[in-house]
Amino acid sequence: MSLGLRLFRPHAAAFGRAVGRPLGASLASIASIASAASLRARTQTQTQTQTRTAAAAASQRRCASSLLQASAAPTSAARLAIVPAGATLIYSGVISKAIQALKRVSVVSLLMTWATTPLFAYNLYMDTGKATVAAIAVMGGALIVSSLSTAVIQWCCKPYVISIAQKMQSSENESIPSRELTITRLSFFGTPYAHTVKETDLRVSAGRMFTTWESEAGKQLYYVHTEAIEENTDIGNVADGIVHRAQLMADGIDHTSHENGTGNKENWDDVVKKLREAKNSKS
């Protein structure tokens, strides 16, 4: 037994050396291939990550650019607004474009009705030699309905304010500048027109439908989205001053009593601020 082991040991060692070298080389080759594949995978992953990051950054830049362009572009109400030199736009009607389209459609439909009805009557007379009572009733009804609908639309939409621009005016007799407001509305044909009124001449509307404010001089009527006006803004201060004057008039106090002997008028912004502070202190 021991003799057989002594005879087999040299052959086993030789066999191990003969098989071990190629096996070690194969294992080293497999390890290098796996390392190269892992390196390629990591490189591809990094490349894909960089590509996605660059694409996301480009998308963010495009979104930011589009938002800046949208914010820089004037709204429909701002395009309709009439802003004098030196004035600042402080209010824009939220449905100005819709009101303009409604007025123009109503006027066009009225003109088309009045233009086509005589032609219809003429054709009917040429075909039959006479106009029946039913045909006359239909034509008259069309004219009346179209005229009434246009009149109602014009009556409802006439006070709608497209925009308000503010310009601060100062004089020698006033230490505090007063507001001069340029109010833009739409004409019968839907074209914008404006007139100027002092902020102190505005009052709360006396109750006419589709109006919120009116002017003391000239009895001009206005509709402003007062529910959408934010506090501590220029238009908010104007609205607060109008409400405050309405409260003074309801209490029987003349708002002109806020003027002192030198003719200096108390700033309505300060008045509103004092009222709010008093309200907050009570609460």
Image: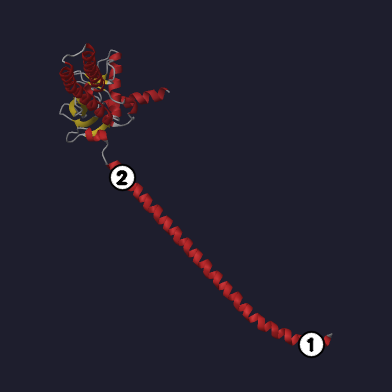
Picture quadrant of residue 102: top left
Which residue appears at 22% of the width and 31% of the height?
166
From the image, tell me which residue sits under label 2. Answer: 68
Query: Taking 262 as reference, is 7 left or right?
Result: right
Instruction: Determine the secondary structure under disc 1.
Output: helix
- Label pair 1/2, CB-CB below 8 angstroms: no
Residue 179 visible here: no
Please state which amino acid type lies under the numbered disc 2: Leu
From the image, tell me which residue sits under label 1. Answer: 6
If the image is split into quadrants, where does the N terminus sit? bottom right
First along the sequence among labels 1 and 2: 1
Q: Is residue 106 depicted above or below 49 in this figure? A: above
Instruction: Determine the secondary structure under disc 2.
Output: helix
Location of residue 56 in the rendering, given as x and y in whole percent from the top left corner: 40, 52
Location of residue 177 in the rendering, given as x and y in whole percent from the top left corner: 21, 30
- In 3D space, how far apart are the residues under numbered discs 1 and 2 (Cα atoms)? 91 Å
